[in-house]
């Protein structure tokens, strides 16, 4: 049985070669006679896998020396509360940009810990653009500014890095490693693995050292970056297998030419798909052109009563997981690093045929 094209928003497609390597090594890791899954996280072979993953991620993202890379659990959603717990310090307020469903969740969680100043929101436009930077209501006394560079559900992406005076925090869950990014501009970057890194169950946090070690009183150990940093993310049992798979993906990315090569490929992939959508009279995308996501492409059909038929026929053509998020409806094609150009071409051919039959 051959592999289908998977446009899932997350957990998302993984490179086939990574899955094959994992399969080969699954039962007997490095001739040790057991699976990596069955080994102690303190075993030198497992520690080596974990360390190499960090080395490769540091190289891919050119992460400066004064940043710690943590491999945690709890998903990006846990970071919504860990960030205020670790970064507020003596401050009583933090700035948040509201560009969609993930921003809203981050804001809601931060409100447990501080006054949240929403510097800008695009809710009135149904989250279809990033509010212009010069309209933001910034607070110079904020502990940090949090934003979501790519809103996975709405398919809305920032075309700039906010230039603010307070520490910058970014939820890069669905866009990390899709192109180069200047890590030194951020106090903290975080990403759940299941979009562009590996399987669900691991969360990468990249945090500048001086933002570690100043938690709110009463912060539990598992929510304290310092505890994790001091223990090389092995304070408790880490998700060893997810960490290993993330490492395989990092090695795969290096083999593909790194994030520069990914940028070229991802740019071409999204250009092709949006240009097809824009040139059709049948499909449309509501997002402002300069804020269209490279990774998540939502689109609607001219006649929503054809949605179910579209999805059924797509599935028959082995184009999977194109249904839009339940909160917005329509379709969404997530085209992360592991989704090849062939998948885009096949999807466009399918959409074109469907339009001819039904449009
Ligand atoms: C998927 C996603 C999340 C939630 O990730 P979990 O790992 O499920 O907690 C948060 N933010 C963004 C931008 C996402 O895409």
Image: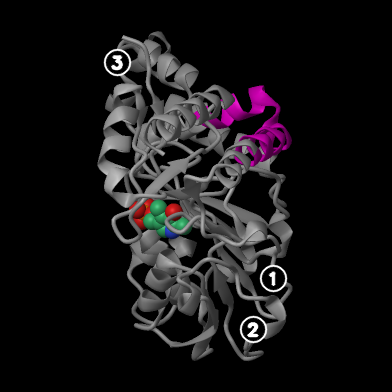
Query: From the viewer's perspective, is residue 153 above or below residue 106?
Result: above
Q: Is residue 165 left or right of residue 14?
A: right
Q: Residues within 10 Å of mark 3 (few under 14, many from 20)?
A: some
User: Residue 34 got which mark?
Assistant: 3
User: Residue 162 got which mark?
Assistant: 1
Please report the bounds of the magenta region as a residue range.
Answer: 249-271
Q: Position of residue 90 (x, y in %)?
A: 52, 89
Q: Residues within 10 Å of mark 2 (few under 14, many from 20)?
A: few
Location of the C terminus (image quadrant): top left
Of pointers 2 and 3, the one earlier in the residue sequence: 3
Q: Position of residue 273 (x, y in %)?
A: 57, 38
Q: Is residue 98 left or right of residue 234?
A: right
**Comparing labels 2 and 3, the label whose residue is closer to the camera:** 2
**Residue under the image location 70 percent in, 27 percent down:** 257
Of pointers 2 and 1, the one earlier in the residue sequence: 2
Residue marked by disc 2: 136
**Comparing labels 3 and 1, the label whose residue is closer to the camera:** 1
Of pointers 3 and 1, the one earlier in the residue sequence: 3
Q: What secondary structure prevails in the magenta region?
A: helix
Q: Position of residue 229 (x, y in %)?
A: 51, 56
- Taking the magenta stretch, the answer to whether it contains residue 337 is no
Name the element at disc 2.
loop
């Amino acid at each position: 049985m051959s592999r289908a094209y998977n446009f899932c928003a997350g957990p998302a497609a993984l490179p086939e070669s990574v899955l094959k390597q994992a399969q080969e090594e699954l039962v007997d890791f490095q001739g040790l006679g057991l699976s990596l899954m069955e080994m102690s996280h303190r075993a030198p072979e497992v520690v080596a896998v974990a360390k190499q993953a960090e080395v490769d991620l540091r190289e891919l993202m050119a992460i400066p020396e004064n940043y710690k890379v943590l491999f945690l659990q709890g998903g990006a959603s846990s970071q919504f509360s860990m960030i205020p717990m670790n970064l507020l310090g003596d401050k009583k307020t933090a700035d948040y940009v509201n560009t969609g469903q993930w921003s809203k969740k981050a804001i809601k969680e931060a409100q447990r810990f501080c006054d949240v100043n929403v510097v800008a929101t695009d809710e009135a436009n149904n989250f279809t653009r990033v509010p212009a930077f010069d309209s933001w209501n910034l607070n110079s006394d904020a502990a940090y500014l949090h934003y979501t560079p790519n809103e996975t559900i709405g398919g809305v992406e920032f075309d700039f890095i906010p230039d603010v005076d307070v520490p910058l925090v970014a939820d890069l869950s669905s866009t990390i490693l899709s192109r180069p990014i200047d890590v030194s501009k951020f106090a903290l970057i975080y990403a759940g693995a299941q979009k562009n890194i590996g399987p669900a169950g691991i969360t990468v946090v990249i945090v500048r050292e001086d933002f570690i070690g100043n938690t709110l009183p009463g912060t539990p150990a598992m929510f304290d970056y310092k505890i994790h940093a001091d223990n090389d993310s092995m304070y408790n049992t880490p998700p060893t297998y997810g960490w290993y798979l993330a490492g395989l993906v990092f090695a795969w990315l290096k083999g593909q030419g790194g994030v520069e090569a990914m940028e070229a490929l991802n740019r071409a992939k999204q250009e092709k798909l949006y240009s097809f959508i824009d040139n059709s009279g049948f499909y449309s995308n509501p997002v402002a052109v300069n804020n269209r996501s490279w990774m998540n492409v939502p689109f609607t059909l001219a006649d929503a009563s054809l949605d179910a038929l579209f999805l059924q026929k797509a599935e028959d053509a082995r184009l999977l997981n194109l249904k839009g998020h339940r909160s917005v409806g329509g379709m969404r094609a997530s085209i992360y690093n592991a989704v090849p150009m062939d998948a885009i071409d096949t999807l466009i051919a399918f959409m074109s045929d469907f339009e001819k039959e039904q449009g």
